[in-house]
Amino acid sequence: MKRFPLLTGALVTALVLTSSVPTVGAYFPPQSEPPAKKKTAKKSEGPDPYRTWIEEVGYILTKPERDAFAKLQSDEEREQFIEIFWRNRDPDPDTVENEYREEFYRRIAYANEKFASGIPGWKTDRGRIYITFGPPDSIEAHPAGGPYERPSYEGGGSTSTFPFEIWFYRYLEGVDSGIEIEFVDPTGSGEYRLSRSPEEKDALLFTPNGGLTLSEQLGLSSKKDRPFFNPANRNLSGRRQDQPFERIIAGSLLSTPPALVRRKLNGAVEETIDFTSLPLAVRTDLFRAGENTGVAAFTLNLANADLSFKNLGGLHQAQLNVYGQIRALSGRRVGSFEDTASISLANQDLSAGLKHMSLYQKTVLLEPGRYKLDLVVRDTTSGHTGVLHHGFEVPRYDQDHVMTSSLVLADVLEPGRPADNRFLVGSTKVRPSVTQRFTTGQNPGVFLQLYNVPLDQTTLKPALNAAYVISRNGQEVLRFPEDGTNGLSNLTGVAQHVTLARILPLAGLEPGEYELTVLVTDKISRTEIAPKTHFTIISQTDR
């Protein structure tokens, strides 16, 4: 029977805050425990499902995972944890089925059927080993015990035994090769217990002059000299794995959950995952790339203060790995990306740089539909890892109606330069503000694309009125008309595609919450579009 290795699917590897991405379409280049039950005098409503789940997967739950689960505060977080727990072990993420999970629960069912003995089979020692490591390569079974001729490495001679079994594994990852695991049923109840000594199965062990080894029969030793009674007295003629301390080490390894490892996409490197949290924030902006294709631009925001910088000859550098996986609602993986990111700060800039944020952007072509992004970012210096799940929908760009891209508020909005293709949308550099928080005196940029804009047949140009309206508490406070003369907007309607882009002079606004509405009226179709977004202005001291 096939045994599945513990995988994290294809999780995590590299990101580049300043990496370039190939041009996309016509518009883009790259760029504790579960909650305690409430105390009540009423009748219990049943077991806590999360406590039950923790108990079920206890054999394969690593300590970092257990610690991370104990810190979760809501049932939604616990559900997300359980989802990624199984996904991290899925040997083939491209299929709908999770073969590891199915095999795990099949093993539990088998253990309950075959190893039950007054307690559920999955709670027995045989059940634990079977569930954790799968079926052995061979089993030597003595279900009735009785007369037994010891092999030479156990000292030879005849004795009588309790029922016992020896399971043999050719190789167990993280344990050893050529593993023999012995289970003994000293009570005759059917509950076989993991043996720490080959002598535990000897029914005559405590019987004077009963079941002697060859050495004891010749008077060269006595039972009190056996390692069972005196662990320091090793049998030098026996096998290494039969020595007392080797048994203790093997027993400890067999009781430890298999290490959760992450396999990079090339399958060449394995690293243990660190669940220490690395705070992440991400936004998804959507643009049209073709009639039946959209572009999802993922912008990741990280605080430099959360990263670990290594001093490399006067240059302080933080190195990050990122892996993103995009799935359809069915669970099928439709895309993934992997990058390496580095952030460098000079000695004189380190103190100020730690107060700032760093951005990374990746663009992916997708068909219309609803998707989920699973993002994992790892600081290679500290080992801190952040995991984020983000849902989004790529719209179908109906050619019969005027449609828009995402409304983007940017902290950088300027004409693109050939030497710098980061954050480019068409010919404009648009660096989105993930937090949409701006300081007093900072002038954010606004970027919006319009698709399927009808043309005036006399001028062969769009006939649009557009304005940017700033409101607070439902009251308009500022309005800026768009006439296409600011050097960023393009109102010519090439291929029925119009770009609205403008820097908003908001220096006079007080700190607080605001709403931006882009009012667009198409004079030809007599339709109005009013996409909105919210932003915050903070004082310099709150930065």
Image (tube, rainbow, N blue to C red):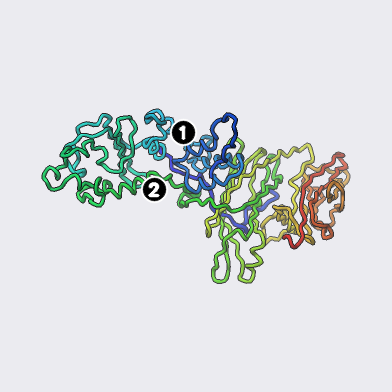
| Dot 2 crowding, Cα within 10 Å, few <14, some 14–19, many 20+ | few
Q: Which residue is mark 2?
A: 174
In the image, taking residue 75 as reference, residue 526 lies left or right, namely right
Dot 2 lies on which element?
A: loop
Q: Nearer the viewer, residue 428 or 126?
A: 126
In the image, taking residue 164 as reference, residue 22 lies left or right, namely right
In the image, taking residue 327 as reference, residue 445 lies left or right, namely right
Question: In x, y percent, where is residue 109?
Answer: 43, 30
Give the numbered dot on residue 135: none
Residue at point 51%, 43% (across, down): 88
| Dot 1 crowding, Cα within 10 Å, few <14, some 14–19, many 20+ | some
Residue at point 71%, 61% (across, down): 417
CA–CA distance between discs 2 and 1?
22 Å
Dot 1 lies on which element?
A: helix
Question: In x, y percent, where is residue 235?
Answer: 21, 49
Q: Quadrant of the C terminus?
A: bottom right
Question: In x, y percent, where is residue 484?
Answer: 84, 54
The quarter of the picture where residue 17 lies is: bottom right
Q: Amino acid at mark 2?
A: Gly
In the image, taking residue 190 as reference, residue 225 lies left or right, namely left
Whichever of callouts 2 and 1 sits on the residue coming sooner in the sequence is 1
Question: In x, y percent, where is residue 397?
Answer: 73, 39
Residue most extreme to the front: 41
The quarter of the picture where residue 343 lies is: bottom right
Q: Nearer the viewer, residue 62 or 119?
A: 119
Q: Amino acid at mark 1?
A: Tyr
Q: Which residue is mark 1?
A: 105
- Residue 337 visible somewhere in the drawing: no
Residue at point 56%, 42% (across, down): 81
